[in-house]
Image (cartoon, helix red, strand yellow):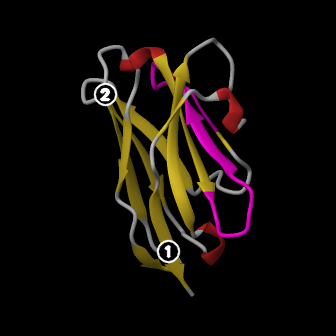
Amino acid sequence: QVQLVESGGDLVQTGGSLRLSCAASGRTFSRYVMGWFRQAPGKEREFVGVIRGSGIRTYYADSVKGRFTISRDNAKNTVYLQMNSLKPEDAAVYSCAARRDGGTWYVRAAEYDYWGHGTQVTVSS
C-alpha cells in the first residue's frame, strides 16, 4: 500500500512558477513510476507527465513540454513537479499517482493504483 500526499499548490500570476511535491509512504519508492495528472472544473482528468522509478527518464504531455519538469528524490520518497511559465489554462487540481514500474510509459489514469488527494493550482491572468 502506498499513500501519497501532495503539497505546494497556490495562486500564481501568469508567467510565474510553482513547485509541487508529492510525498509517498513505503520503503520501495524507487520501484514505482510516479505520474502527475490534473483536472480543471468541468474537464476530464489530464495526463501531465511521468517519471520512471530510477528518476532518469521522464515523459510529458505536449501541453506542458518545455515548461514543466518532473524529478524525484528516492531517498526522501518524494516526487516534484516544477512548473514554469504558467498559463491560465494550467489552473487545475494536480494529483500525483503511483504504480509499479513495469518497463513502459503509463499515461492513462486507469493504469495507476495509488492516488493523492490533489493540490489546487490557480493561475491569474
Can the viewer see residue 3 in this picture?
Answer: yes
Q: Is residue 50 magenta?
A: yes
Taking the spot 31% from the left edge, 28% from the top edge, the residue there is 25
Residue type for callout 2: Ser
Characterize the local packing of mark 2: few (<14), some (14-19) or many (20 or more) Cα atoms within 10 angstroms: some
Side of 102 where 69 appears, left or right: left
SS for callout 1: strand
Characterize the local packing of mark 1: few (<14), some (14-19) or many (20 or more) Cα atoms within 10 angstroms: many
User: Quick one: 60 or 111, which is closer to the camera?
Assistant: 111
SS for callout 2: loop
Range shown magenta: 39-59
Q: Is residue 30 above or below residue 43?
A: above
User: Quick one: 2 or 58, which is closer to the camera?
Assistant: 2
Q: Position of residue 103 (x, y in %)?
A: 64, 12
Q: Position of residue 74 (x, y in %)?
A: 32, 24
Residue type for callout 1: Thr
Instruction: Locate the C terminus and report the quarter of the image it occupies.
Output: bottom right
Side of 87 where 25 appears, left or right: left
The residue at the far left in this view is 76
Taking the spot 36% from the left edge, 14% from the top edge, the residue there is 28
Q: Which residue is mark 1?
A: 122
Residue 25 badge: 2
Q: Is residue 41 magenta?
A: yes
